Structure formats: C-alpha cells, structure tokens
Image (cartoon, helix red, strand yellow):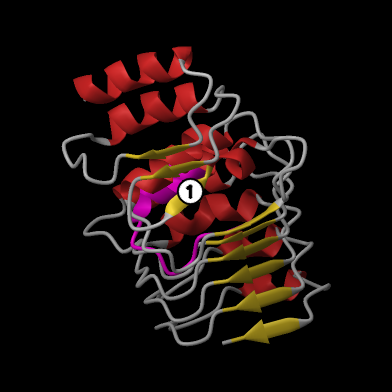
Amino acid sequence: DAGASSLATAMRENKCLEHLDVSRADSVGTVGIEELSAALRLHPKLQSLTLDSKPLPVAQLVGGDDANPSLDVAGMGLGERSSFAMGALFAGNRLVSNVNVANNPIGARGIERLVRGLSDSPLKALNIARTGLQEVDDTAISALTATLCRLGLISELVLDENELSCSEATLAPICKLRQLRTLSLEKNKLSRIPNLIGTMLSLRKLRLFSNGLTELPASLCLLTALEVLDV
C-alpha cells in the first residue's frame, strides 16, 4: 500500500481536485484505502472517490454543512475497499441518520469497518441486507455484532438475506441496542435467537421469516410493546 500512502500525502497538499478514481489500482489494499480516505476527509473540494464501479459521494460521507443525512448506495456494486473507505470518511460525521448499503458484495469485514466509522454518529437506521455477511466461522460476524452494539441511538436494523447461521452468543450483542424498534433478520439460516432478545423493550417489529428456527425464546413474552412478530 505504499502507493496509497504517497497519494494520501499528495492529497493533503492538494486543494483543487474534485474527483478521484483509483478503481484500477488493484494492488491497493484496505490499509492503504483507510489512509487515503482519512486524508480525503480533510480535503476542501473533493466530491467523489471511485474504488469500484460507482463513485462514493465524499462530501456526503464526511457530513458537510449541506450534506443529506440519508445515504443510499444500495445496489451500486460496492466491495470491501469501498466499505473501508466509507468507514474512514464517516469518522466525525455528526449528521448522518440513515444509511442503506443493501445489495452490495461487501462482506462482514467491510461492514464491520463501515459500522465502526458510524459509531459516533446519530444514526437511526441501517440497512445491510444482502451484503454477503455469510462466513465459514463466526469470527467476523462476532466482530460485526460487537461493533453494531455501539450504535446506541439506532432504531431500525435490517440484516435480511445474508445466509447468517451464527450462534445465539454471536448474535447476543445486538440485544444491547435498547433503542431499537425494528429488527429484521428475514431469510437467513438461523436456528435460534438469543434469550436476551427479551431485554429489547423498545422493539415494535421483529421479523424472523424464512429462517430455520426450531424454537423461540420464552423471553419474547417480555416484549409487551411488540406490534409485529413475523416468523
């Protein structure tokens, strides 16, 4: 990632560039992308950064004065590198409230990095459906759920169609999201959900349709505000 490091240094000095395309620089890995993106976050004029098939809206990711608080990049063919860039660019964003990255082949590592960048934001809704979260083991998913629980203000979380088959313990950190009103885990491969689901007293909608659930935890009866339960 030496090339990305040099480019990051150059971008700290540049004050005029508006569009940057490094989609053909396949040798640049996620470490280099993070360093470059951190430098771009301070650029006064840059509007877009392209790492995959479509450009990322840098100004909106950074959260400038006129930025839209809702970011929708669903189905743009974004991969892991783009997600690492978004995570680095989101750092310090105190505006973004709604993020939709569904239908992008990002993977668990990339989504974890994106969420980490959002951990200090006032995020209310996150859609990471169909983002390729399935993993051979639970390690990457465990890191992701541990990071998701930092989103203390979030009220809607969508994880549909990711072929998730992880254990109850791996999912359990999500239950710390006490402001969550909608949790959707439809069309995965889950066999059980954590008993701690009963501590999510703000839940209004719980969508578990089309999983391999063998039983539901008794603690669901504690969710007295629940309006929709779809199994």
Q: Is residue 120 left or right of residue 128?
A: right
- Seen at 56% across and 87% down, the residue is 231
- Total numbered labels: 1
Task: Tell me which segment is drawn in magenta.
Answer: 99-114
**Percent of width and height locating residue 40:** 48, 27
Which residue of the protein is positioned furthest toward the right in this rendering? 225
On the question of residue 142 being in view, the answer is no
Q: Which residue is mark 1?
A: 56
Between 131 and 213, the residue placed more toward the observer is 131
Q: Is residue 159 left or right of residue 62?
A: left
Give the vertical position of 165 relative to 99 (above or below).
Answer: below
**Looking at numbered disc 1 in the image, what kind of residue is underneath it?**
Leu
- Seen at 43% across and 69% down, the residue is 103
Q: Does 107 appear in magenta?
A: yes
**Percent of width and height locating residue 101:** 50, 60
Give the structural element (helix, strand or loop) at label 1.
Answer: strand
